[in-house]
Amino acid sequence: MQFAPLPYLDPGSGSIIIQILLAVLLGLGVALRASWSRIKSLFGAKPKSDEDDDSSDA
């Protein structure tokens, strides 16, 4: 009869996994925040220019 050991994660391994997941989520958030203007420009959101404001006043 053979005995197969059960999978085991000690508390230290769980802590490392949680830290990696948090680092990935925070890293994605920082990357998203840093490139937000590029992302907006991809979807067609263009900033207003001064020329558009002048033509609407006349």
Image: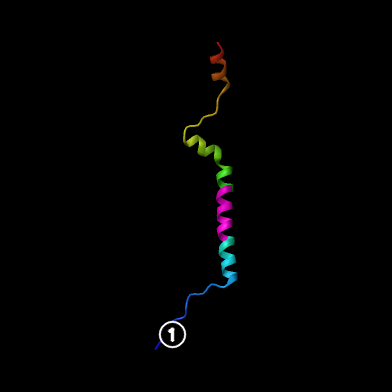
Residue at the far left in the pictured view: 1
From this view, report whether residue 25 is shown above or below residue 14. Answer: above
From this view, report whether residue 16 is shown above or below residue 43. Answer: below
Along the line of sight, the residue nearer the viewer: 41 or 16:
16
| Disc 1, SS | loop
Residue 18: x and y in percent read 57, 62
Tell me which corner region of the image, top left, top right, bottom left or bottom right, holds residue 23: bottom right
Q: Residue at 55%, 50% (x, y): give it.
A: 28
Residue 24: x and y in percent read 55, 55
From this view, report whether residue 29 is shown above or below residue 10. Answer: above
Bounds of the magenta span? 20-29
Q: Which quarter of the image is occupied by the N terminus?
A: bottom left
Residue 29: x and y in percent read 57, 48
**Total marks placed:** 1
Q: Residue at 53%, 72% (x, y): give it.
A: 9
Along the line of sight, the residue nearer the viewer: 51 or 16:
16
What crowding class fits label 1: few (fewer than 14 Cα within 10 Å), some (14-19), or many (20 or more)?
A: few
Q: Which amino acid does label 1 sit on?
A: Phe
Our reading of the magenta stretch's main secondary structure is helix
Q: Which quarter of the image is occupied by the C terminus?
A: top right
Q: Residue at 56%, 47% (x, y): give it.
A: 31
5 sits to left or right of 12: left
From this view, report whether residue 57 is shown above or below residue 37. Answer: above
Residue at the far top in the pictured view: 58
Q: Which colour scheme is used?
A: rainbow
Tell me which corner region of the image, top left, top right, bottom left or bottom right, holds residue 57: top right
Q: Residue at 56%, 23% (x, y): give it.
A: 49
Residue that badge 1 annotates:
3
Residue at the far bottom in the pictured view: 1
**Magenta region includes residue 28:** yes
